[in-house]
Amino acid sequence: MRTDKIKLNPLLRLIRAKSIRIIFGLLLIAGLYLFLTSPTMLLYRIHKKGKLIVAIRNAPTIYYEGREGQKGFEYEMLKEFAEYLGVELELDVKTGLTNLLDAVNAGFCDLGSGAISRTADREEKYFFGPDYYTVQQVVIYKRGNPQPRNISDLAKGTLEVVSNSSYEELLKNLKKTYPELSWRRTENISTDQLMYKVWTGEIDFTIADDNIAALNRRYFPELQIGFSISQKQALAWVLAKKNRKLYPLIESWLNQYRESGKLKDLEIKYYSFVDIFDYVDIRKFHDRIETRLPIYKDYFITAGERFGLPWTLLAAQAYQESHWRKRAKSPTGVRGIMMLTLDTAKNVGVTSRLDPEQSIMGGAKYLSRLLRNVPDDLYESDRIPYALAAYNIGTGHMQDARKLAEDLGYNPNSWADLGKVLPYLCQEKYYSGLKHGYARGTEPVRYVSQIFDYWDILENTITHFDR
C-alpha cells in the first residue's frame, strides 16, 4: 500500500503541474484578450493610425460642406470627440442609412453617425453609444392640402419613407393595428429629399424627425407638420463590434462636453431659431430672393470679396436691416440698404447712403472692421455673431455685456452666454454700474438670430437660386 502511494506521487505531481500550466495559460490568454479589447488598447490602436474613422451621412442636421467649410451638429460633436482622443477626424460619407450601417458592421470604420434613432429592433442588430439628443417623429404634408390628423388619414394619400429607417420600423409596427396603412419605400434619397417631394406635390406625406422637419420648413415654407406619430426617441452613434469598448470613452467625453455647456451651445447654434417659425416672414424672404436679391447680388459678391466676408452673410444682414430696400429709413435716422448712421457712413467713406452699391460696400467695410476688433479671447465660432451684435448695439455695450457676464458667472467669451446677459442691459440694477449705461439688449440677440436664420436659408437655397 505504501509502495503504491510512492509510485503514484510523481504522476500526481505531473498532473498537478500540467493543470497549473493549463490554468495559468488560460488566465494569460483571458487577460491578454481583455487587454487587447480594453478601452486602453483600443485607444492605442486609434492613436497608432492617428485618426478616428467615422461613416457619416450628408444632411443639414448631420454634416455638410458650406461656403464657410464643414458644418453640422453631429460633425462638430465628432470633431470635438476626435480632439479629445488626440487624433484627426476622417469622414467616410455614405449615401443612405443602410450603407452607413453596413460599413459599421463590416468594421470599415470606428463608428457611424447619422441622426440614428435608438429603437428596439436596431438594438438587437447594432451596438449603440450613449444618447446625445432626443427627437420625435412627425408627419409632414404640404400647406393647402387637407391636414392629416391621425394614422388612418395617411391611407388617403401617397406616403413615402426611407427604407430600413426608424420611420419604416414604426410603420411596420403600426400596420399591425392599422392594416389599411401602406407606404412606398426608397433606398436612393434622404428624408430631406422626401420633404422636398412633399413640397413639390410629388407625394402627399412623409415622416421625419421633428428637428429635421423644423430645419427644412425654412427652406420649403409650405411644409407643415400634421401630428406626432411616435414617442420621443434618443439619438446615438453606432459602434463597430470591434470597437464596443469605445462606449466608456464616448460616455466620459460626452459627460464633460455636456457639463461644460458646449452641447447646449451647439443645440442653440443649430436649433435655437427653428422653434419659432413665421410662415409669412419666411415666405416673403423666399419671394424676395427671387425678385429683389438679383438686383443687388453682384454688389454683395464684390463687397464680400473685397473685405473677406461671405456675400451670403452680407445679403442676410442687409435683409434683416432693410428687406433689401435701397431707400429704407428708420425713425432714428439710419438709412439705406445696410441702414448706416450718418456718422458711420462718413467714417467708411459713403457719400450717399441711398446708393445701394455704396451702402453695401460701406456696411461690409464697417462689419469687417468690427470683426478685426473682436476681443482675441472670444471663441472663433462666436466672432461673427459678436461683430453683428456690435453693428446693431455698438462696441461699448458689447464690452459692458462681457463685463456683466463675468460678474454674473457667465462666460464672456461665449456668444451663447452673452445672449443670456444682453437683455439685462435694459434693467437699471445692472446697467447703472456699467460704463455705457442703458441699452435695448434684447434687440442684438434677436438681430443676430434672424441674420443667421436668413444666412442659413440663403446658403441652402443658393444652388437652386444660381440655376
Image (cartoon, grey):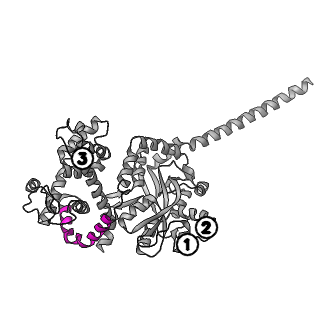
Residue 163 shown in magenta? no
Query: Over which residues does the magenta segment extend?
Result: 280-304
Name the amino acid type tagged 2: Tyr
**Mark 1 burial class by Cα count in 10 Å: few <14, some 14-19, many 20+:** some
Which residue is drawn at the image coordinates 38% and 64% (left, top)? 217
Distance in Å between CA atoms under marks 2 and 3: 52 Å
The residue at which mark 1 appears reads as: 155
Dot 2 or dot 3: first in sequence order is 2
432 left or right, relative to 99: left
Which residue is drawn at the image coordinates 31% and 39% (left, top)? 410
In the image, 45 versus 111, the foreground residue is 111
Dot 2: element: loop
Main SS class of the magenta portion in the image? helix
Q: Position of residue 157 (x, y in %)?
A: 51, 74
Distance in Å between CA atoms under marks 2 and 1: 9 Å
Residue 296 shown in magenta? yes
58 left or right, relative to 334: right
Dot 2 or dot 1: first in sequence order is 1
Name the amino acid type tagged 1: Ala
Say if 108 sits above or below 22 in the image. below
* Residue 441 - label: 3
Q: Position of residue 310 (x, y in %)?
A: 25, 60
Q: Residue furthest right?
A: 1
Name the amino acid type tagged 3: Gly
The residue at which mark 2 appears reads as: 178
Which residue is drawn at the image coordinates 38% and 50% (left, top)? 266
In the image, 124 versus 171, the foreground residue is 171
In the image, 312 versus 139, the foreground residue is 139
Count of marks overlaid on the render: 3
For the residues labelled 2 and 1, say whether their Cβ atoms are less than 8 Å apart.
Answer: yes
